[in-house]
Amino acid sequence: MLERFIHHLRVELPPDDETADAARIRLREKFPRQAVRRMTHLGLLVGSALDGLALGPDDALVYASTFAETCALEDFLTSFPAASPLLFQTSIHPSAVQQVLIGRQQPLARLWPLAGRARLVEQALLTALLETSPRVALVGGEERGTWMLAHAMASPRSFAFAALLTPDPTYALGRLSFTPENPAPPAAPCPSLEIFAQALATHQSLAWRGAGGTWVLSWS
């Protein structure tokens, strides 16, 4: 069995109609004034979720997002034929977490950016459980899209979460575990990234099967 225990945990579930400008006003006290003006909506949410979590150069971070910097990508695509290099730079997949780490001048041992859909949560958890660093930050999120929603290429709502996973059960908030099974059980639906974020926010337990075993999220 593989397991890690949840320590720091923070989830951002803003109102569905929150814009990047509204997030800048709501979260501006958490960031340097010059930095906050350049941050994306998802960058602000991820930064808020990471607020209070002190990472070190020996720690690792797993970042999960299906659509990532949707608004920057939308603006980049609509900027053609005079494509914006700045929007292109901002639209790369791990941009949100990089905005925070660069702003903090925070080195890490490893950064694992992951994209996917049906089994993204499972991929992110397996990466975190197999990571050799004793401390792993599990971070994920999405930002609400506009015209890309009609093409099923954007999230209908914005959210972000950050959890510190360690092998130490002392004073842990919860536990994530994977139990391999041979023969492998039939795969069951893996929770979406949004459902997983909501479960973290409400301390709801989850269990499902996939990757050759059983996954469990439980709380102390």
Image: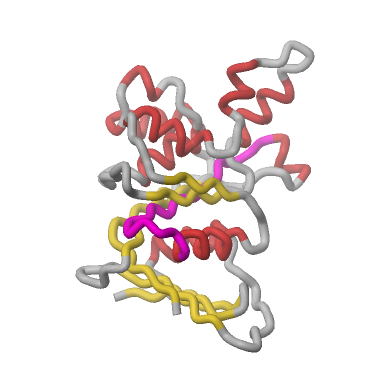
Percent x, y of residue 164: 34, 56
Please give left or right for residue 66 compared with residue 50 in the image. Answer: right
Residue 50 visible (yes or no): yes
Q: Measuring 49% from the left and 34% from the top, which residue is drawn there? A: 41
Residue 51 lies, with reference to residue 99, above or below; the image says below
As for residue 176 lying within the magenta part, the answer is no
**Left or right of 150 on screen, residue 99:** left
Q: Is residue 133 magenta?
A: yes
Q: Tell me how the rendering is colored.
A: secondary structure
Front residue of 71 and 91:
91
Q: Is residue 164 visible?
A: no
Residue 162 percent location from the top left of the image: 39, 52
Task: Name the residue rendered at 52%, 65% in the picture.
Answer: 126
Query: How far across and down, in percent of the image, does residue 76 sit?
Result: 68, 23
Residue visible at 43% across and 33% down? Answer: 23
Question: Magenta segment, which residues?
Answer: 130-146
Query: Residue 116, position in %: x, y?
Result: 65, 53
